[in-house]
Image (cartoon, grey):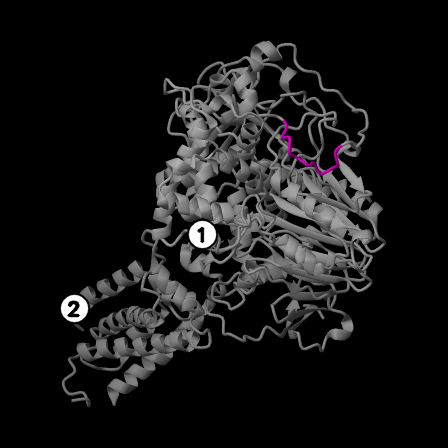
Amino acid sequence: MKFVTTTLLIALLSFLSGLYLPWWGFALAAFIVSALIQQRPGLAFLAGFTALFLLWAGLSWSMDTPNNSILSRKIAEILPLGGSSMALILITALVGALVGGLAALTGSFLQKKKVVNPDME
Amino acid sequence: MRIIPFLISLLLTAGLIYFLDNQWGKIPPLGKFLSPQHGFWQNAEPVGKNFSGELSLPGLKDRASVYLDQYLIPHVYSNSEVDACYIQGYLHAKFRLWQMEFQTFAAAGRLSEILGPGDSDRLVKYDRSMRRLGMVDAAQRALAKMEEDSVTKRDCDAYTAGVNDYIKGLRAGDLPLEYKLLNYQPEPWSNLKIALFVKYMAFDLAGADNDFEMTNAKSIFSKTDLAKLYPAVIDSADPIVSKGTHFLPPGFVPKTPATADSLYFSNRDTLTATEMKPEKSNGSNNWAVNGTKTLSGRPILCNDPHLSTNLPAIWYQMQIRTPQYNVYGVSFPGAPYIVIGFNDSCAWGVTNAGRDVRDYYTIKFKDDTRREYWFDSAWKMADRRIDTIRIKGRPDYYDTVALTVFGPVMYDPTFNGFANVTSSRSYAVHWKAADSSNEIGTFQALQSAADYDDYKHALDHFKCPGQNFIFASKSGHIAIWQQGEFPAKWKGQGLYIMPGEDSSYMWQDNIRAEENPNMLDPDRGFVSSANQLPVDTSYPYFLGSDFPPYRGLIINRRLSQMNKIIPADMMNLQTDNYDVFAEMARPLLLRNIEVSRLDEEGKKYLNIFKLWDLRNDTLEQGPVIFKYWWSHLQEEVFDDEFSKSTLPLMRPFESTLLEALLKDTAYSFIDNINTPEKETIRQVITSAFLKAVPDLIQASKDNKITWAKYKDTWARHLLRIPALSRMHLPIGGGTHCINAAKQFHGPSWRMIVQLTNKTEAYGIYPGGQSGNPGSPYYDTFVDSWATGKYLPLWVMDMDEIRDKRIKWTMHLKPSDQ
């Protein structure tokens, strides 16, 4: 449960940070959440990664669909991803996820003692 | 807490964020760019987006409404002219912000600042060219003049406030896509930027000359040859003002300098500077017919300005209604007012005059510091300007420019344009666009013009770039004026670089405005212009020779034949792909081809060419065959002479070669000077064809043997990014056709206005109302434009608010209400 809670919390705070902070604001959210909620570093990374992967994939997909992929097809030519909107959504999600995961990992090392037995196990 | 892993992890995270927050080469900062809440995804405009809303705007004086129709064309209802300008600024910014700012950066020589130095410093050279030409100074002088006029100042202030109020309301995510791709931010708008845009148009339309190339040609060729290669008059030309028109005696007769023969015409100096030139075929067509030639008995006015077919499009369509006027047409994002359009009383349009208003002078500096130059028998101090050119990713570049009585020094030992060799001498430029003037005042006045006198009066403001303003009114008048302030030149003045050691070669005075070529209600029932020579040789001033003849010729021929015209006839005319140049050249080619020397493949292509209907339609092979044949013929005739020199030279115009061969089958340049024998016209025409055959076979293999595929017209994004452009458009036409669609250039706005009691108007441009590549309105009109379709221009009436064509309404109110 803790993993799911952490993931959702990171995703939620990341979304809110996106409204007010620069693009990297979600890294602070992931960092703080995993500093406060005790988890093993590996799981913390996974939580940050998953949260941002889902958030950025979801957000970009939710903007791409009503746009009929007009823009994503063009950007996927420029970047270059062979004009594939899906590839662009995937890359978007991975970039967010990598930063989110690393930020969460960093936060997890701030915890006072080792996590021995989180409820996931 | 585990300090080591923490630090490592922190470093990794920070490093990754740093990497993703910065631009590497051409790749935008990926974190910022991909972030769904900040980056490009925000520009993915939902199809069917609701543009309706209530807006409180600080700069507005009174309530106003903007009705957006199904093409996103705004119909602005405002209670005052000043509010109309404010709203226009706001809308231009809302839909075209990046483009309008980018164009002013291009005008001010600031492209390196946002794009970097470019391949082999191309963009730095571009920036230096624009700065040296004096674009910023010219804009500042124009601004002073604009702000002297209380109406222009009031309107520009309002327009600028509208743009800035839009910019102030922008969130990072709302920035146009291109800012995100290039990683920069918009600056505040200003009236100076409006002036810069006006000067950019002056550069585009009156910034071309061939003075350097012609000076080199003068050093290589004899006087007789020079006259054969660059004749002053084209026989086939059908001038704007009909031949035989009587002109006023000249108000001023310029004096040829006493030294002209020795120091100027016989001077054999050469130059190496390679100039940056605007698109050569920035031309246009316009014509108006009166009621004697139309079915309705009322005038019809047509205009299609030929400019770069850019995306976002250079034009933005709108209707503006105030208590003073009800105007419809196209505006330039970057400046207030409707530029080409019509109101409830009349219609107007423009083509480029193409007169030479830019000349160069050789400057003799005392030494390498270029602080003093020889003028009127003494060393004279030169003013100096130091330009700071900011370059993305590099330290600033400082360019020291000497300023002379003629104008700024354009080329000197530190700057030789785009040439790879250094110049030892210095050349100052004198350009009409550097004089102060208020061109947009003309458009302000035209918006509310009621009849000919208002139109005529409106033109007074317009000095540069010289334009052929065409006019038609509901009261039945048609007219054309070649408007601009043109120097009265002695014969040959400014064809070549002039001596700059005294004042004798300077421009002496301007041609009086009333002497400008014009026609009002001629008996033939129409007026027209297509960048051709404005007048015949009886006009008392020297005009130069760079005037393309063919579009004007075919337009006048067609208009003479047409009667009972309806707007649909004008659509056919504007999109006519008939090639009158080919019509004149084909008999010459067929007369002189030695068929016996052709193989089967050659005979096949020759036969296609013979049977071609002379129309540059999309699927025709004839125009491709003609194109290759003619360009090889030019090489056969001129390469031997021209390839002897490495200096910048200009090949003779296509019309020159055609007329020479039609007149004289023994035209001296036919002979190849590198062979002992004397070639004949039959030999060169046949060997040109033989050389074209392999090209045609290759084109056939590449699937480029049909005209549209060969020509490959694009609506090209300003940054030349293919993904943001519309490529390979199925459109015919070409340089010498009325439908002058070339690869990246063509009819940028086609307009037809029938001035019946209820105006009936049609138009189309190769773009869309939105500048956002992520909007479905980015390229709305491109396909219709390519296939020659038009959309009705709907002048919305107040009682049509509930019409189903209105999709969205923006209610605007002043912030304090």
Mark number, residue B5: 2
Q: CA distance from mark 2 to mark 1?
A: 45 Å
| The one of B316 and B96 positioned closer to us in this rendering | B316
| The one of B681 and B549 positioned closer to us in this rendering | B681
Quadrant location of the C terminus of chain B in the rendered image: bottom right
Q: Position of residue B349 (x, y in %)?
A: 70, 49
Disc 1 target residue? B719
Residue B720, compared with residue B62, is above or below; it is above
Q: Position of residue A88 (x, y in %)?
A: 34, 69
Asked which secondary structure carries label 2, the reply is helix
Asked if residue B494 shows in the view, the reply is yes
> In this picture, which residue range is highlighted in magenta?
B233-243
Q: Are marks 2 and 1 on the same chain?
A: yes
| The one of B564 and B120 positioned closer to us in this rendering | B564
Q: Residue at x 57, y 45 (%)?
A: B579
Amino acid under label 1? Leu
Asked which secondary structure carries label 1, the reply is loop
Residue B546, compared with residue B803, is above or below; it is above
Q: Is residue B239 magenta?
A: yes
| The one of B168 and B790 positioned closer to us in this rendering | B790
Say left or right for B366 vs B85. left
Q: Position of residue B660 (x, y in %)?
A: 55, 28
Mark number, residue B66: none
Q: Residue at x 43, y 67 (%)?
A: A71
**Chain ID at mark 2:** B
